[in-house]
Amino acid sequence: MVYHSSFVDEEGISKACGCPLLPLKSHIKGPAPVSDQDRTDIVDEAITFFRANVFFRNFDIKSPADKLLIYLTFYINVALKKLEGCRTLAEGTKAIINLGLENVPVPGESGFPFPGLFVNPESRKEAELFRNYLKQIREEASGRLLSVAYRPNGTPNKWWLAFAKRKFMNIIAL
């Protein structure tokens, strides 16, 4: 059974491209509202559920937040593939920073991994809002992923990096 997001009915949350812009426990500047540090956010859920959800080829969407969970699960898979060859935390950090500098496509652009999952943006402003949100959430996920993919002594955690070989929803991540 696929793990779904607990953010089912978030009243007062703005949306872009049919995706809720959920609050994040983040110090990174961006359009996401700031969440309390003691609350679980969508990035925590994605990292917690990743090792179970990555085995599924189908994902039943029960709320708009599940779309974001799918996107983050795919992004974590891509990030783990980048970390696969990195033997130290310093090398991993460099690889993740380079991944963060890549262009972030939005629905309707080539390179977006899930055409049809999100609604195409209605305006350039909505596209930039969604792009900035995805960039912020990717940066936050990258930072938190490093803390689980590497042990405190800086060596790789094989129990996490082994999942780099998995294909999420049968999509090949480059």
Image (tube, grey):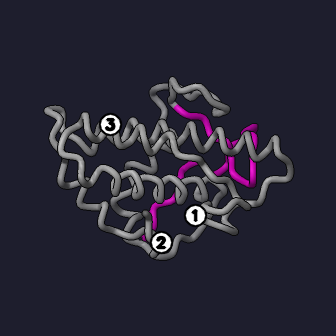
Where are the magenta residues, as a range? 1-24
Residue 171's label in the rendered image is 2
Circle 2 crowding by C-alpha within 10 Å: few under 14, some 14–19, many from 20 = few
- The amino acid pointed to by label 1 is Pro
Q: Mark 2 and mark 3: span between their CA atoms?
A: 25 Å
Q: Secondary structure at mark 2?
A: loop
* Mark nearer the viewer, 2 or 3: 3
Closest to the observer, 139 or 3: 139
Residue at the image point whose x is 74% and y is 41% from the top: 128
Circle 1 crowding by C-alpha within 10 Å: few under 14, some 14–19, many from 20 = some
- Are the residues flagged by discs 2 and 1 in contact, CB closer than 8 Å? yes
Sooner in the amino-acid sequence: mark 1 or mark 3: 3
- Left or right: where 49 falls relative to 28: left
Q: Mark 1 and mark 3: span between their CA atoms?
A: 24 Å
Q: Secondary structure at mark 1?
A: loop
Q: Please state, as top left, top right, bottom left or bottom right, where the C terminus lies in the image.
A: bottom left
Q: Quadrant of residue 53?
A: bottom left
